[in-house]
Image (spheres, rainbow, N blue to C red):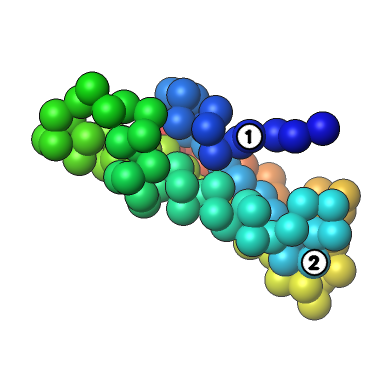
């Protein structure tokens, strides 16, 4: 099964919160980081999906995207991997902050 997240994430209009552990053996951390960077910072990625936009519109779109994504990283020393991020005692506060900022 293949997930083309970098292609689809650009079509999401709602804010996105990515929670990813660096020791995730199911989805390598680099993929989560790349997804965040793709969504947040790279106008050339946006341009591939929005080639009909002017340069100013592309700039505005990339700014909109960068304001709507947040990556929370969990270090490998926690040992939370793919399934145990819920163990983060600060998770409720992290989620509340994200929701209130949206």
What quarter of the picture does the N terminus occupy? top right
Counting from the top left corner in percent of width and height, residue 34 is at 55, 54
For label 2, the crowd category at 10 Å Cα-Cα, with few meaning under 14, some 14 to 19 and many 20 or more, is some
Residue beneath the point at 36% across and 49% down? 42
Instruction: Name the residue beneath numbered marker 1.
Output: 4
Tell us which disc is closer to us: 1 or 2.
Answer: 1
Question: Of label 1 and label 2, which has the lower sequence position?
Answer: 1
Instruction: Name the residue beneath numbered marker 2.
Output: 23
Residue beneath the point at 41% across and 38% down? 68
Q: Does residue 54 appear in this view? A: yes
Residue beneath the point at 72% across and 66% down? 22
Q: Does residue 93 appear in this view? A: no
Q: Quadrant of residue 8?
A: top right
Determine the secondary structure under disc 2: loop
Tell me the tag on residue 44.
none
Determine the secondary structure under disc 1: loop
Judge whether 55 appears above or below 23 on screen: above
Cα–Cα span, label 1 and label 2: 22 Å
Counting from the top left corner in percent of width and height, residue 41 is at 36, 51
């Amino acid at each position: 099964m293949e997930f083309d997240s970098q292609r689809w994430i650009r079509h999401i209009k709602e804010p996105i919160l990515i929670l990813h552990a660096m020791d995730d053996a199911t989805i390598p951390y680099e993929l989560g980081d790349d997804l965040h960077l793709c969504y947040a910072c790279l106008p050339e990625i946006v341009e591939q999906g929005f080639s009909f936009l002017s340069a100013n519109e592309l700039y505005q779109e990339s700014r909109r995207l960068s304001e709507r994504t947040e990556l929370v990283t969990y270090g490998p020393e926690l040992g939370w991997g793919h399934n145990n991020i819920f163990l983060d005692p600060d998770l409720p506060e992290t989620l509340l902050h994200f929701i209130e900022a949206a």
